[in-house]
């Protein structure tokens, strides 16, 4: 809440002036007290000159004059009677204009600490004209999504102001941003590639064909013995502005992904397996979903691909604040902890991964996506989702980890032991309960497909590990019977 000693006096001055209706004044008080335009819009704090497009109640004018005796306030107000009232009420240091065109004709090149645009006065061309012809440090803008593509204005602000806040009046959400170096990609896509010469061209072609143009593609050849590395170099030669290649000794998928993550320069980072591919709108739409909601993670749907005539769609978007719960911010991100660890259908804010030191565990040679998925979602406060199935997840390729039914699947005991050690020191009871569900579900899936002679040993090890780690965390069902039933399954479930 704002703390202005003379606020009541200022409010009474505005109210008795009859500048505008009382409801708008009350609304302006509420907006300032609740940071409606974000934390950077503070007309009650000492600052240089500001521009108001739409006078509203006049409260912001009065506060700016009160806070800084040297400030000049520029007001674009189309109503002549309102302009007259403003000029009579504030005879000094307030300059009124009937239009943005009139303001620019007089004040082109002026430096402004802040600019506020009321939804009733929003015009995309006028806003961009002001930003192009003046030096604005911060803008807060109220608009309807049908007046201007929000992402287009978001990108424009990134290159023209130090900071900005855009509020979508009809969507009831706001987004904040800062100036961005135009050389920084919006999304870096890391392609971990080992022995995928038969599939890599299809994968990379789908990436260079994205509708998003400010995209960085990093192909990490993890010591492939086939032509994977050669094909990667050919793509770099064809698209030198977008494609980079890293050649490294074989170290496993986790080390390849970490090498790409370390080299990534993008605002967000994504991971694609070298034998998969993505649909053309994927990263543009994911970036729109994540950036406009200031989300750490953006998620879309995917489809499992067996052959050209068989696709299984997985939209997996629910519990969000948009229409039907399938778009927008997930109300409870921890609900998504039990989803399949499909890291490749998401983009992650790179600064968020750095903040929590989240990487892939290189000592785990396969299925490293499971701990990465759990760590990223358990820390996230804002996950934005769309239901579109954009990622093609290829199954039944020879050599895939997910196809294994032998002792290689015992790696999951090491995975969950390590994940527990990483999460337990800071996690809430809810997160631990969700991790218990994830471990139960993972072991049940493995038991249902594992080679029959290995199932008794796997079952006993799983039961002991869960008992040791999660004693006291209730999941609401008989999980021991659930695992026993999975172990008794006579046929492996189709992948």
Image: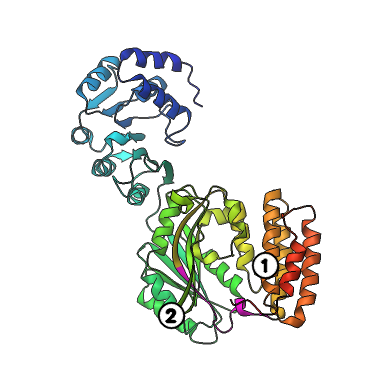
Model colouring: rainbow
Q: Residue furthest bottom?
A: 226
Residue 93 location (% of width, % of height): 29, 21
- Is 87 one of the magenta-colored residues? no
Q: Secondary structure at mark 2?
A: loop
Residue 377: quarter of image: bottom right
Q: Is residue 113 above or below residue 373?
A: above
* Dot 1 and dot 2 residues touching (CB under 8 Å): no
Task: Provide the residue span drawn in magenta.
Answer: 391-405
Q: Secondary structure at mark 1?
A: helix
Residue 114 location (% of width, % of height): 36, 34
- Is 400 one of the magenta-colored residues? yes
Q: Which residue is mark 2?
A: 308
Q: In front: 164, or 426?
A: 426
Residue 460 location (% of width, % of height): 81, 71
Q: In front: 420, or 180?
A: 420
Q: Is residue 396 above or below residue 164?
A: below
Q: In front: 10, or 413?
A: 413
Relative to 181, is 276 on the left or the right?
A: right
Residue 354 location (% of width, % of height): 57, 55
Residue 62: quarter of image: top left
Relative to 441, is 454 on the left or the right?
A: right
Residue 193 seen in render: yes
Which residue is found at the position 55% from the left and 64% from the top?
A: 343
Q: Which residue is mark 1?
A: 442
Which residue is found at the position 61% from the left and 57% from the top?
A: 337
């Amino acid at each position: 809440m704002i703390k202005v000693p003379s606020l009541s006096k200022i409010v009474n001055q505005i109210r008795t002036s009859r500048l505008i209706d009382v409801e708008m004044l009350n609304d302006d008080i509420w907006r300032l007290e609740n940071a409606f335009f974000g934390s950077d819009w503070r007309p009650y704090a000492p600052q240089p000159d500001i521009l108001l497009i739409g006078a509203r109640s006049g409260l912001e004018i009065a506060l700016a004059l009160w806070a800084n005796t040297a400030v000049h306030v520029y007001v674009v107000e189309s109503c002549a009677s309102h302009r007259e009232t403003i000029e009579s009420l504030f005879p000094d240091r307030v300059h009124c204009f009937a239009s943005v065109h009139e303001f620019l004709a007089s004040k082109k090149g002026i430096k402004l600490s802040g600019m506020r645009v009321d939804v009733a006065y929003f015009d995309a061309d006028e806003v961009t004209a002001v930003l192009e012809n003046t030096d604005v440090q911060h803008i807060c803008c109220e608009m309807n999504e049908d007046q201007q593509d929000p992402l287009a204005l978001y990108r424009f602000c990134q290159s023209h102001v130090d900071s900005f806040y855009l509020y979508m009046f009809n969507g009831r959400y706001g987004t904040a941003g800062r100036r961005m170096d135009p050389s920084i990609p919006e999304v870096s896509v890391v392609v971990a590639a080992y022995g995928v010469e038969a599939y890599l061209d299809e994968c990379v072609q789908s990436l260079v064909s994205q509708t998003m143009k400010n995209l960085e593609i990093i192909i990490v050849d993890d010591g492939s013995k086939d032509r994977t590395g050669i094909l990667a170099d050919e793509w770099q030669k064809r698209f030198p502005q977008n494609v980079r290649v890293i050649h490294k000794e074989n170290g496993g998928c986790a080390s390849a992904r970490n090498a790409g993550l370390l080299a990534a320069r993008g605002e967000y980072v994504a991971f694609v397996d070298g034998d998969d591919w993505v649909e053309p709108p994927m990263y543009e739409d994911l970036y729109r979903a994540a950036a406009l909601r200031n989300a750490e993670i953006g998620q879309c749907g995917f489809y499992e691909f067996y052959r050209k005539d068989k696709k299984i769609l997985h939209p997996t978007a629910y519990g969000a604040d948009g229409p039907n719960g399938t778009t927008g911010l997930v109300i409870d991100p921890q609900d998504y902890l039990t989803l399949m660890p499909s890291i490749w259908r998401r983009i992650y804010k790179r600064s968020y991964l750095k903040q929590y030191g989240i990487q892939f565990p290189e000592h785990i040679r396969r299925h490293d996506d499971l701990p990465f998925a759990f760590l990223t979602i358990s820390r996230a406060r804002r996950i934005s989702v769309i239901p579109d199935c954009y990622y093609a997840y290829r199954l039944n390729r020879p050599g895939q980890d997910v196809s294994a039914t032998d002792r290689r699947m015992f790696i999951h005991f090491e995975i969950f032991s390590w994940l527990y050690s990483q999460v337990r020191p800071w996690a809430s009871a809810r997160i631990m309960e969700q991790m218990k569900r994830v471990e139960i579900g993972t072991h049940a899936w493995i038991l249902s497909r594992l080679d029959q002679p290995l199932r008794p040993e796997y079952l006993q090890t799983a039961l002991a590990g869960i008992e040791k780690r999660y004693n006291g965390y209730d999941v609401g069902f008989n999980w021991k019977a659930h695992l026993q039933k999975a172990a008794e399954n006579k046929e492996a479930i189709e992948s």
